[in-house]
């Protein structure tokens, strides 16, 4: 039994699915070949036996995905509220059991916003309800060389995208630069069929491992929409980097919460949109 006040980790399954499947295809010259395609599976989330939502997922990190979804939707306060997360692919379901029991999210989930996430992501409640209270730390710094180290580290990842395409990837990294050498340590790299799932899975990993986001950099292959900015801010991460572009609402919210947002980042090219005070060239 855990000591009073001790951190409690929920009981977890490890139910990762096969991430790619081989199918036959015919190319432009009429030649048949076997190619890999990405998996996609429905996963219905239950909290204390109440059905909440069905997520379409690659199945790389289903337990972390469920936890991150609950965290980013502000449906549970902390990881200590959760007793167990059990994934059963025979019925395509994940059951989350809370320590207090009998969670009722009817009021919170009554209002639903369909976002621009791939596969139509959703945000419950008022999209902007808690943004006014978020202010990201101003002390962390990211150097241009640290950014380049991150882009190189992400490029070197062995990814499902390289095998089969059709997925988005997200990473959480710690970038350092001592003036002589810059490096990027990738703490988590998650791929999924929707970028909102990938960011939720990383949020779940951070919750489980009690990782503070204040000195970290979040990378995504997807575009920087309001949803991505809000989730990054909720995770307490002050740097958001993407190889893609951004939306007007994403830009506006990033300025509001004090997020350093970098888009169109590939090789040695990038565009710094917000939070220039944290970035050192």
Image: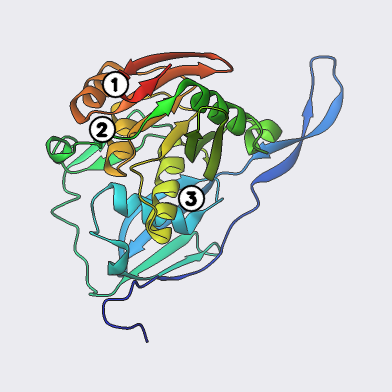
Q: Nearer the viewer, residue 172 or 30?
A: 172
SS label for mark 2: loop
Residue 77 vs 196, above or below: the answer is: below
The answer to which quarter of the image holds residue 105 is bottom left
As measured in the structure, the alpha-carbon distance from the residue carrying label 1 to the one carrying label 3 is 42 Å
Q: Total of numbered circles in the picture? A: 3
Q: Is residue 110 left or right of residue 114?
A: left
Disc sitting over residue 138 in the figure? 2
Disc sitting over residue 42 in the figure? 3
Disc sitting over residue 231 in the figure? none
Q: Nearer the viewer, mark 1 or mark 3?
A: 1
Q: Position of residue 162 (x, y in %)?
A: 68, 31
Q: Is residue 254 left or right of residue 63?
A: left
Residue ID at (34%, 71%): 7
Q: Position of residue 170 (x, y in %)?
A: 49, 37
Residue located beneath label 1 in the image: 277
Determine whether label 2 and label 1 are within 8 Å by CB: yes
Q: Position of residue 269 (x, y in %)?
A: 52, 12
Determine whether label 1 and label 3 are within 8 Å by CB: no
As measured in the structure, the alpha-carbon distance from the residue carrying label 2 to the one carrying label 1 is 8 Å
The coloring applied to the image is rainbow
Q: Is residue 151 left or right of residue 117?
A: right
Q: Earlier in the sequence, mark 1 or mark 3?
A: 3
Q: Earlier in the sequence, mark 2 or mark 3?
A: 3
SS label for mark 1: helix
Q: Position of residue 51 (x, y in %)?
A: 31, 60
Residue ID at (25%, 32%): 138
Q: Nearer the viewer, residue 94 or 150?
A: 150
Residue ID at (40%, 38%): 196
Crowd rating for badge 1 (residues with CA inside 10 Å; few <14, some 14–19, many 20+) = few
Q: Nearer the viewer, mark 2 or mark 3?
A: 2
As measured in the structure, the alpha-carbon distance from the residue carrying label 2 to the one carrying label 3 is 40 Å
């Amino acid at each position: 039994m855990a000591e009073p006040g001790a951190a409690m980790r929920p009981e977890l399954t490890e139910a990762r699915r096969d991430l790619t499947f081989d199918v036959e295809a015919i190319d432009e010259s009429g030649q048949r070949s076997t190619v890999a395609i990405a998996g996609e599976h429905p996963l219905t989330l239950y909290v204390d036996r109440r059905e909440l939502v069905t997520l379409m997922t690659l199945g790389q990190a289903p337990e972390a995905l469920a936890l991150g979804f609950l965290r980013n939707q502000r449906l549970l306060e902390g990881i200590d509220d959760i007793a167990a997360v059990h994934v059963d692919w025979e019925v395509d379901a994940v059951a989350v059991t809370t320590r207090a029991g009998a969670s009722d999210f009817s009021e919170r989930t009554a209002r639903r916003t369909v976002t621009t996430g791939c596969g139509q992501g959703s945000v419950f409640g008022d999209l902007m309800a808690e943004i006014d209270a978020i202010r990201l730390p101003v002390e962390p710094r990211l150097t241009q060389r640290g950014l380049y180290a991150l882009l190189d580290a992400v490029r070197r990842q062995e990814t499902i995208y390289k095998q089969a395409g059709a997925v988005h990837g997200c990473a959480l990294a710690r970038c350092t630069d001592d003036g002589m050498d810059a490096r990027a340590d990738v703490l988590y790299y998650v791929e999924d069929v929707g970028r909102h799932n990938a960011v939720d899975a990383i949020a779940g990993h951070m919750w489980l491992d009690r990782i503070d986001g204040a000195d970290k950099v979040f990378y995504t292959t997807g575009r920087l929409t309001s949803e991505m900015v809000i989730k990054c801010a909720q995770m307490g991460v002050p740097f958001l980097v993407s190889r893609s572009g951004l939306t007007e609402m994403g830009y506006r919210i990033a300025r509001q919460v004090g997020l350093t947002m970098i888009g169109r980042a590939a090789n040695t090219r990038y565009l710094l949109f917000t939070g220039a005070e944290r970035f050192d060239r």
